[in-house]
Amino acid sequence: MDSRSLAEQEKDIRDLLRRAERTPVKTSALRKDTLKRLIDLAHSPHPSLKVIVATNLKYFIKDFPELEDDAINAVYDLCEDPVSSVRIKGYAAIVDVSREQQKWVKRNADVLVQLLQSDEPEEVTFVKRALTQHLDMDPVITLGVICDQVVPPDEPLDEEEQAIRDRLRSLVLAFLAGEAKRSLVERHASAPGSAAEQILVSGLFKAISKLTPSEVDVIVKDILASLPSFRPPSLRGRELLDLLLSQVRAALKTDLPSGAEKGFLQHSRYYLDLASYVAVDRRLAHPSHLLRFYYTNLTTKLVLSRLSEEDQAYVIRRVAEAFAASEDASGRAPPTAPAAETAKRMGNGGDIAEDTALRKQFPDVCAVLLQIFTDMKKADQRPWAACHTLLQGIVRRMRDNRLQIPQHVVGLLRRIEPLQASEDLRTENRAAQQQVHSVIRVRNGPLFVIAACVRRSPLSLCFDHCSCSSNRSNPRLRPPRRPAHRTP
């Protein structure tokens, strides 16, 4: 312990620093002694002397490799000092050291990540600033350190360690989604396929399969969806959708175990919602990929019959949304269909063969969904808006392909027509119910009768149903009489 007064010690170190600055030989004994003195003062009881240490170590640390470890440990000690002003100077000193010696970036970035756990909000601001500066210095290494903290370790942890790790992960994700986002989007992860972008994306993809829903939500919506490499058309969006759908498949095994008569989409819904966000809301992947997943995994009678009516309604809604978005992305959506925003059309990865296959499957899938819709016991569960979208799809398919509406669908339409909405149904759902009935009752005649007639030409659309028995019984549907030709 130095027995001299603070003023004397300050004068002594400042004189030593001035002489060291004037010394032309960087590795001189004087400069080495100065570095040793700075390392010693890092443990002084006087904050002002520690501040001098923090602001001057950078001038000497790289010239004396044998003292590097002692010097960097002195900086870390400053970051844990009891005095806040000293700690803040210590965070800045970490940045200085990394700038002087690139090899310290990884270790220093890891220290800064740990320091995000500080209980002092004002100091966390300085820590985040220092971490952002490390991103600017070496984005690949720094993002690697950050992602290491996001991905849970494979080895088991005790309860206390797990709690610390979980809290730190939430802080790191908040940093990526907040203070670091601009630099990531504009500089470090702006180029698809760059080293930094690959480190970040691969790390976050790996984490998705291991984290809680709330954490995955931040990763997908607040980080990945903002990156330029995910802007359609791109392969990244498809990769993300495929990853989410793989999580759905795993969750379905839990929600619908083999051998069980009933099941609930308790775990699957979350990832299905995220998949809808990616493919329908943001169009980061072509919606047809999501629609194909629904057709294959969730729209069979065997699966739907095992679900509660609430889950059945959920599936019908999601299929209708994915169908409308897929039609929109392919440029076929009718103007009234949900998600049909022409300005947002993005042909990012739709496959022609897949599109053709989905179009062929649609009537059969739609029939199953409408069957489930009509069989629902609870009127307030029926998704009328989704039913309207599906009916529009049927009409469009039949008209585009000059086909008759299948008889089993006709039967379903007859069953839907008399259905009434629940008394306490919300206004928008009641309006959707009216739209469904208006689609079925075309020109005051049943759609399923009109469409069952074989059309001869597009121009005869309104006058081509005279062969239908319904038209003969309904004068308003008869074709207009043409005046007889008279010979003068």
Image (cartoon, grey):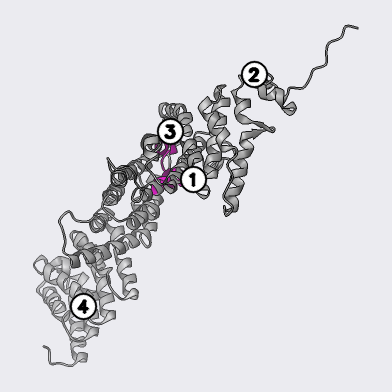
Say which amino acid is labelled 3.
Gly
SS for dot 3: loop
The residue to which callout 3 is attached is: 350
The residue to which callout 4 is attached is: 53
- Quote the CA–CA distance across marks 1 and 3: 38 Å
- Quote the CA–CA distance across marks 4 and 2: 90 Å
Q: Is residue 284 magenta?
A: yes
- Quote the CA–CA distance across marks 4 and 3: 61 Å
**Would you say the magenta stretch is mainly helix, strand or loop?**
helix
Q: How many marks?
A: 4
SS for dot 2: loop
Q: Closer to the observer: label 1 or label 2? A: 1
The residue to which callout 2 is attached is: 457
- Quote the CA–CA distance across marks 2 and 3: 31 Å
Q: Closer to the observer: label 4 or label 1? A: 1
The foreground one among 307 and 278 is 307
Crowd around label 1: few <14 · some 14–19 · many ≥20 (10 Å): few
Q: Which residues are magenta?
A: 274-291
Q: Closer to the observer: label 2 or label 3? A: 2
Say which amino acid is labelled 4.
Val
